[in-house]
Image: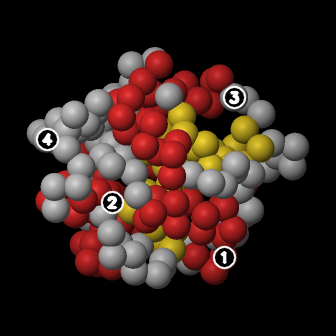
Amino acid sequence: MICHKCRLVGLLGGSFNPPHQGHIHISNLALKLFGLDEVWWLVSPGNPLKIEKPASFQRRYERAQSIIHNPRIRVSEFEYTYRIHNTFETISKLNHRYPDHLFIWLMGSDNLVQFDQWKNWDWIFRNIPIVVLSRTKSDLPGLASRAASAFSQNYIPSNLARNIACHEPPVWTLVKTPNIHVSSSQYRAKGLWNAV
């Protein structure tokens, strides 16, 4: 898996409903900690596990572009263009489309809690290095989750994970991040973002 000529890219998937400074913070952190060339925000057409309908793709995509000021963070229409709704399909298609890239999957520990509900979740673990970014309240439930337990032997401490992109999957780590007191659900709860 080691490829010195490959571009190292972190994939941050989600509804981005709405995108906010917390997304920017963890993207910048991932760029620094893992020596990534870029982070791609994969704005999803919709989350199969969420009942609530998000704002239109165009609105979420444009908002994401408007708040990013780092050229190494890119907003991607990949899932929308190919009408992809499941992460395993995204990863498979990206690997096929970009053979000269090494990807790592970035997600919050809140996602790890219910990761076993994602379609082909174990395939995802076996096919891409995973970086779980701390969301304080969900760290312990995440570490006790079915997915974390199933791949506990493949966990590496964050201080040894600098080159995680070059490890053969399955491999994953949990990175402690400064507590960011902002979330998309808070924006929606305060009426600062409506599904338009």
Q: CA distance from mark 2 to mark 3?
A: 26 Å
Residue 160 tag number: 1
Identify which residue is drawn at 23% across, 55% down.
192
74, above or below 34, in the image: above
Residue 104 in view of the camera: no
**Disc 3 target residue:** 98
* Residue at the (50%, 28%) spot, across then down: 77
Q: Which numbered disc, 3 or 4, marks the residue that appears first in the sequence? A: 4
The amino acid type found where label 3 is placed reads Tyr
How does the figure colour the protein chain or chains? secondary structure
Q: Are marks 1 and 2 in contact (CB under 8 Å)?
A: no
Dot 1: what SS?
Answer: helix
* Image position, residue 26 (x, y; %): 51, 65
Residue picked out by circle 4? 52
Which residue is depicted at the point 65% across and 23% down?
A: 97
According to the picture, the residue beneath numbered tag 2 turns out to be 112
Q: Which amino acid does the dot numbered 2 rest on?
A: Leu
Residue in front for this viewpoint, 156 or 28: 28
Q: Which element is circle 4 on? A: loop
Tell whether label 4 touches label 2 (CB within 8 Å). no
Q: CA distance from mark 3 to mark 4?
A: 33 Å
